Image (spheres, coloured by chain):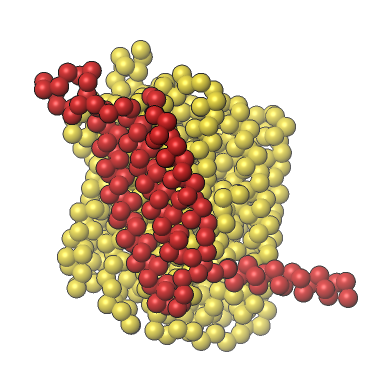
Chain colours: A red, B yellow
Amino acid sequence: MSIDLVTIVLLGLLYAAGFYLLMQRSLMQIVLGFVIVGHAANLFLQAAGGPPGEPPFLGVVPESAMADPLPQALALTAVVITFGLTTFLLALVYRAWVLLGHDEVQDDLEDRRVRRAEIAAEREESG
Amino acid sequence: MNALVPLPVLLPLLAAALSLVVGHVPAVQRLLNVLVLSGIVVVAAMLLVRADSSGPVVLQLGGYAPPFGITLIADRLSALLLLVSIVVMLAVLVFAIGQRITDRGRASTSTAFHPMYLVLCAGVSLAYLTGDLFNLFVGFEVMLSASYVLIARRSNAQRVRPSMTYVIVSLTSSLLFLTMVAVVYAATGTVNLADLTEKVGALPPGLRGGLALLMAVVFGIKSAVVPLHFWLPDSYPTAPAPVTAVFAALLTKVAVYALIRTQTLLFGDATSGAFLLAVALLTMLVGALGAIAQNDLNRMLSFLLVSHIGYMVFGLGLFTEIGLSGVILYVVHHIAVQGALFLVSGLVIRHAGTPSLRHISGLARTNPVVAVLFAIPALNLAGIPPLSGFVAKVVLLRAGAEAASPLAYAAAAGAVLTSFLTLYALSKVWVGSFWCEPRPAVPDVDPTDDVTVGTRATSRPMLLSAGSLVAAGAVIAALAGPLSAVSDRAAADLLDRGPYRVAVLGAERAGG
């Protein structure tokens, strides 16, 4: 299955921009990153069906001219899923904002504590 | 008989809708949930008996000819794992009801627990039973969406950050999954697993290798394989005990199942085997060493969970019949024992008021029942005979020795070392928290949330369900004979691929 150049470049840009945003500290940017990578994946799924064609109605359109309907059905399902999860993610970000008063991703406190204990133990040994 | 296959997916989804409708009567919700899960246990047992005696049970949804429609298939592996998973879900549900986190709670009026638990069950069942890559994605999404709600439900300021980590990492891996489906469809024009078996084999080696790697990354994130494990010890420990128990027991194992299924059906040659063995070695050691450094009970158990995922990847990486048989035994054992450990940790926290190991002391004297309940699965996880962990580990080590390659020997040695490190980590807990002088319980930090801690009283359903999961380790060991016979046959099916293809596609298409 071949995909045209414009779609390939677009897909590359969307994936790159999306993953860049996903790695940011602000939760809102992460949500936008999720949305953009979601678009990229759905567009890719759509493009995987090959070049566009006639609507796939048996008996109305010759079979050779039909577009492949399966990836479209898959993309539709995936769009619904990503849409639903985006709303959930937004609600969660809102709750984090209400509870914490900001929308930054924070460090893992327990990791820090383990690390501090380790440094203290090293000092005791050397000193 | 074929009509039984969709029941584990349909029943809980319909019951979830009903459960929302009767949300104002918690007693009805509880009864409905217990009844549905018990029903699915029966269905899964019937599917297993049928699949073992007369081959995979297949249903083509909507009567579409394969490979165009959605295929549901219960073969030995999926039926066995479905049965064990739902039994554990049932035990955890009883615990959750006993802990009263399912009720309206002291501060909130949410009744989301039961419907979401049922949706989670539907997602797990769908992921096990599907014969189609895209439907596997849908199954994962159903399961994960429910898990997002369960982990973020009633979160306070401390719990919202870890649940955010969990949600974002899972969502990212889901998008990679979707990308993988698109690549597979663009390359082969099908998403039916049985149909893909042949078509993936015909792809150029570079593309095949790329696909195998993409699948390994997707399922590696979901099953928390090192170096993709960072999210797990961060997010699991903060949820209430039953939620952590069901996540630890099932979610990672469903991903391991997907890894087994895709690697054996689609790839399964020496190169990806060596890659998986290296990853397995790393996972076992990093997880076990991470566990030793922790001083929070739940975080330590989470690192041990990561480390023991390595055992399953180890057996898979060998790609021999005995190796796969060992993996199946290990998954069955681990679902039960990891669920049991997290439930017991819930009991410990309820008793001591905190998961911090520095503040728990003398539990063996103040609460001997919990001490026994902790000791048995802890010994089981480390692989002390005569419990189920020993049986599974012996089979895996034998498989490693029979494979007789340097990497297999290294991974087997790593497995033995990990077993010792596990024992060390758990005995550290035992010495520090169960022996020594008893300390008074730390008072409940947030008395308004839905988990009561720092109380000497344990409710009977909690003890019973944790006890039954602990006993399951012994039962699995007692049934090791018939169980390993089933897992041997399942492993042979996995390597042969033939029965699976014939069952889905029919004899002519599969042959030609």
Left or right of B405: which side holds B329?
A: left
Location of residue A52 by image quarter? top left
Residue B76, percent from left and from top: 39, 35
Question: Outermost residue, right direction?
Answer: A127
Please give the name of the residue rendered at 33% of the width and 82% of the height, measured from the top-left corner.
B107
Left or right of B143: which side holds A26?
A: right
Location of residue B315 by image quarter? top right
Q: Is residue B148 visible?
A: yes
Identify which residue, A17 or B34, lies in the foreground.
A17
Point out the image quarter for the C terminus of chain B. Answer: top left
Left or right of B502: which side holds B354?
A: right
B395 relative to B227, above or below: above
Please give the name of the residue rendered at 61% of the width and 28% of the height, measured from the top-left corner.
B271
Question: Outermost residue, top direction?
Answer: B512
Please give the name of the residue rendered at 51% of the width and 86% of the height, measured from the top-left corner.
B443
B215 relative to A68, above or below: below
Number of marks present in the image shown: 0
Location of residue A59 by image quarter? top left
B509 relative to B85, above or below: above
A99 relative to B2, above or below: below
Question: Outermost residue, front direction?
Answer: A6
Point out the image quarter for the N terminus of chain B. Answer: top left
Q: Is residue B477 visible?
A: no
Please give the name of the residue rendered at 67% of the width and 50% of the height, measured from the top-left corner.
B285
Residue B286, percent from left and from top: 66, 53
Residue B273, percent from left and from top: 59, 32
